């Protein structure tokens, strides 16, 4: 949907960008609302016919109702429930005595929570920038019509099929000073080479950043590549005729044209970052000590290891707020763009 | 490829031959370096799963293999000890299958019907309801942990695969409905109208028109759900324990086993076993995988 301002390319028949076209069409066309009266065969008994008509009329809603109910409970009741628990005096077991915001106060005074959101901040910034930079670089290089494009793409994207747990576990071995990269480089003859980030309080967070980028940059690459290919070829040809070089064309024509993709990729990556849990558990288990605690780990720990349910719930609400802080402006921006465009058309 | 090359724009063709070949070389160099960065973990794990433990201990993880055996695979599957029981990760692998397959099928089936209703049988307010439903896509798992823990406890489903199937089905509904609804919106309205004039009802239209057009989106949805549920860790580790754990949770239990000696050979095999189903799907259904990824991400 965010691609609507991109210039649609003639003949985007290649599989990789089929979805772009699809999305564009979805966004463009508001399918007319169909009437609900289904044509039912005439029956001899008027009463029975009426009953069947009515059933047919309400059938879609009836079928949809359970899913709607479940989704409603999942989204709103669960959120409300957790919110309420965060305002109660629950400890090991939930209780429903209202105590107000005291758990939020103690949460923000907690040193470990302080570490958790500082980590989240550092991680988010580096992870998003790193994954986007590498993703864009790879997308541009692949866009030079290199040989074996699908092979490169397959290699860069496969980490996304692998779970955070597997990723974190394997990288923790590579970061392990006594068996991984440090051991390998020392074996090559560089005796005082040091690469032991995961055992260093200050550096462990950057090990998680590297691993996170390893997993997500292929995703950024895929989206950027699809975007690059959707840029109007005439625009590029015009720039070429004007004598612009490759670098200049990318800087001045192509990248500005895919601006909305940058925002979309950033929003998705930020979502991943805010939910970071498995990766840190598998890679450092929040350590050394508590150095790589993340908000999601904090929630898990308080709720299920320490029996401080209310404060854990308060932390979970903070995660929800962080997500909302990213997603609400993004959706408003989307709505605004759609309005503006339909105004122009 | 070659016919395309004649018409498509080649950014590097703007400069001279020498510069062009140099730039091409640079491009391949960078691509190759990054490919090494991406492949390193996979290659290391793969090779170590066939090496012997003494050899790994002596030469480190990143080394050319001098031994070869399937021993580690057998041990990881059948007899490796996790938390007191020595039955390998076989059972955890089966748990993951028993959780992932039903949850994928149920959530996809319901999502398809929901998508059909929300695109072809719209009613006043249906767009708003759809919007509210898709909020589920953004819900962080942490918000749902406590309610789920209590509901699963109340239903007696704690530490069961059925409980995880329920959790993942409900959570997946938002995604599957979104995917299918957006896809079905593109099916021409005239097709449905014509069928209705011919007397076809709700289910008949679904069976005769919608379903035959659905394979692409159903494949995307199934792949998305399968990989997502298989790889999920938070719910797995919170709601199950011991032999009831899916493989992601078991893997963490395995690697934080407490013993000082790391059995890298067996662990490598276990990691590969855990990663294999999604990887196979990725390598064989890559096109659909990517499509789901981009659709799921963009929304």
Image (tube, helix red, strand yellow):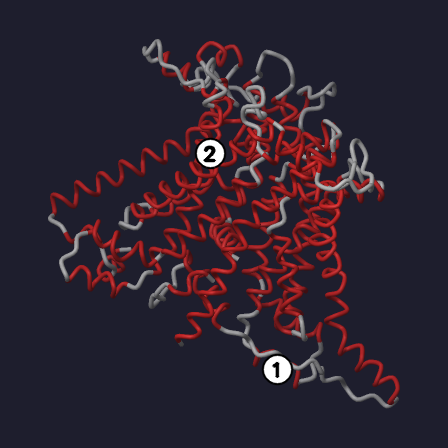
Vertical position of residue B184 compared to residue B107: above or below: below
Vertical position of residue B152 compared to residue B288: above or below: above
Q: Residue at x 56, y 70 (%)?
A: B185
Mark 1 neighbour density, 10 Å: few (under 14) some (14–19) many (20 or more): some
Residue matched to label 2: A122
Residue A70 or residue A144, whichever sits in front:
A70
Residue B54 or residue A33, whichever sits in front:
A33
Q: Chain of mark 2?
A: A
Task: Find residue A216 and name its label.
Answer: none
Q: Residue at x 65, y 74 (%)?
A: B122
The mark total stands at 2
Residue A140 or residue A288, whichever sits in front:
A288
Residue B9 in the image: state x and y as whole percent: 23, 58
Q: Residue at x 48, y 27 (%)?
A: A205
Residue A176 in the image: state x and y as whole percent: 48, 18
Vertical position of residue A137 compared to residue B122: above or below: above
Q: Chain of mark 1?
A: B
- Name the secondary structure under disc 1: helix
Task: Tell me if A9 is positioned left or right of A215 in this view.
Answer: left
Residue B212 in the image: state x and y as whole percent: 60, 68
Mark 1 vs mark 2: tell me if same chain.
no
Q: Is residue B94 visible?
A: no
Residue B78 in the image: state x and y as whole percent: 67, 24
Mark 2 neighbour density, 10 Å: few (under 14) some (14–19) many (20 or more): few
Task: Tell me if B248 is positioned left or right of A55 in this view.
Answer: left
Task: Find residue B193 and name its label.
Answer: 1
* Closer mark to the observer between disc 1 and disc 2: 2
Distance between the Cα atoms at labels 1 and 2? 55 Å
Task: Tell me if A259 is positioned left or right of B121 in this view.
Answer: left
Vertical position of residue B24 compared to residue A36: above or below: above
User: Cβ–Cβ below 8 Å for labels 1 and 2?
Assistant: no
């Amino acid at each position: 949907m965010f691609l609507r301002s991109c210039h649609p390319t003639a003949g985007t028949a290649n599989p990789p960008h089929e979805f772009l076209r699809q999305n564009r069409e979805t966004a463009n066309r508001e399918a007319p609302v169909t009437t609900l009266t289904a044509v039912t065969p005439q029956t001899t008994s008027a009463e029975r016919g009426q009953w069947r008509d009515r059933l047919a009329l309400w059938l879609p809603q009836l079928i949809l109702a359970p899913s709607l109910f479940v989704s409603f409970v999942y989204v709103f009741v669960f959120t409300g429930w957790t919110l309420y628990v965060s305002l109660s005096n629950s400890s090991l077991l939930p209780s429903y005595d209202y105590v107000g915001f005291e758990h939020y106060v103690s949460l923000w005074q907690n040193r470990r929570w302080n570490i958790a959101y500082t980590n989240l901040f550092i991680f988010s910034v580096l992870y998003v920038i790193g994954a986007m930079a590498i993703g864009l670089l790879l997308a541009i290089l692949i866009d030079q019509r290199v040989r074996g494009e699908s092979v490169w793409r397959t290699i860069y994207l496969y980490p996304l099929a692998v779970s955070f747990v597997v990723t974190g576990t394997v990288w923790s071995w590579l970061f392990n000073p006594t068996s991984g990269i440090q051991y390998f480089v020392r074996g090559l003859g560089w005796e005082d080479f040091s690469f032991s980030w995961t055992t260093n309080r200050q550096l462990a967070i950057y090990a998680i950043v590297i691993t996170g980028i390893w997993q997500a940059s292929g995703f950024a690459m895929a989206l950027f590549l699809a975007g690059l290919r959707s840029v109007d070829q005439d625009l590029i040809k015009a720039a070429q005729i004007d004598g612009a070089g490759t670098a200049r064309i990318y800087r001045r024509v192509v990248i500005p044209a895919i601006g909305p993709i940058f925002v979309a990729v950033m929003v998705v990556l930020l979502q991943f970052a805010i939910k970071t849990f498995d990766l840190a558990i598998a890679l450092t288990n929040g350590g050394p000590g508590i150095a790589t605690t993340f908000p999601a780990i904090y929630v898990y720990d308080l709720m299920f290891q320490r029996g401080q349910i209310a404060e854990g719930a308060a932390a979970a609400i903070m995660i929800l707020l962080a997500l909302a802080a990213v997603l609400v402006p993004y959706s408003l921006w989307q709505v605004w763009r759609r309005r503006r465009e339909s105004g122009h058309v | 490829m070659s016919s395309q090359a004649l018409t498509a724009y080649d950014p590097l063709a703007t400069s001279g031959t020498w510069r062009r070949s140099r730039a091409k070389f640079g491009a391949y160099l960078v691509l190759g370096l990054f490919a090494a960065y991406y492949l390193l973990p996979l290659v290391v794990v793969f090779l170590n799963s066939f090496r012997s433990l003494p050899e790994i201990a002596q030469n480190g993880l990143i080394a050319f293999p001098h031994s070869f055996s399937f021993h580690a695979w057998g041990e990881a599957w059948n007899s490796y000890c996790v938390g007191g029981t020595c039955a390998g990760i076989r059972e955890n692998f089966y748990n993951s299958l028993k959780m992932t397959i039903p949850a994928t099928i149920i959530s996809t089936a319901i999502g398809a019907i929901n998508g059909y209703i929300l695109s072809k049988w719209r009613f006043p307010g249906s767009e708003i309801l759809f919007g509210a439903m898709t909020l589920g896509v953004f819900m962080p798992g942490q918000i749902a942990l406590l309610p789920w823990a209590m509901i699963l406890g109340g239903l007696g489903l704690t530490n069961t695969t059925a409980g995880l199937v329920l959790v993942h089905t409900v959570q997946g509904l938002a995604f599957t409905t979104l995917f299918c609804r957006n896809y079905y919106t593109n099916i021409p309205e005239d097709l449905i109208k014509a069928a209705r004039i011919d007397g076809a009802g709700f289910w008949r239209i679904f069976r005769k028109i919608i379903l035959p057009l659905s394979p692409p989106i159903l494949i995307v949805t199934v792949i998305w759900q399968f990989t997502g549920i298989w790889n999920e860790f938070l719910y797995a580790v919170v709601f199950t324990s011991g032999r009831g754990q899916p493989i992601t949770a078991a893997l963490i239990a395995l690697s934080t086993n407490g013993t000082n000696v790391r059995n890298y050979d067996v662990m490598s095999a276990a990691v590969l076993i855990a990663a294999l189903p999604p990887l196979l799907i990725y390598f064989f259904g890559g096109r659909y995988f990517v499509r789901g990824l981009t659709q799921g991400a963009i929304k």
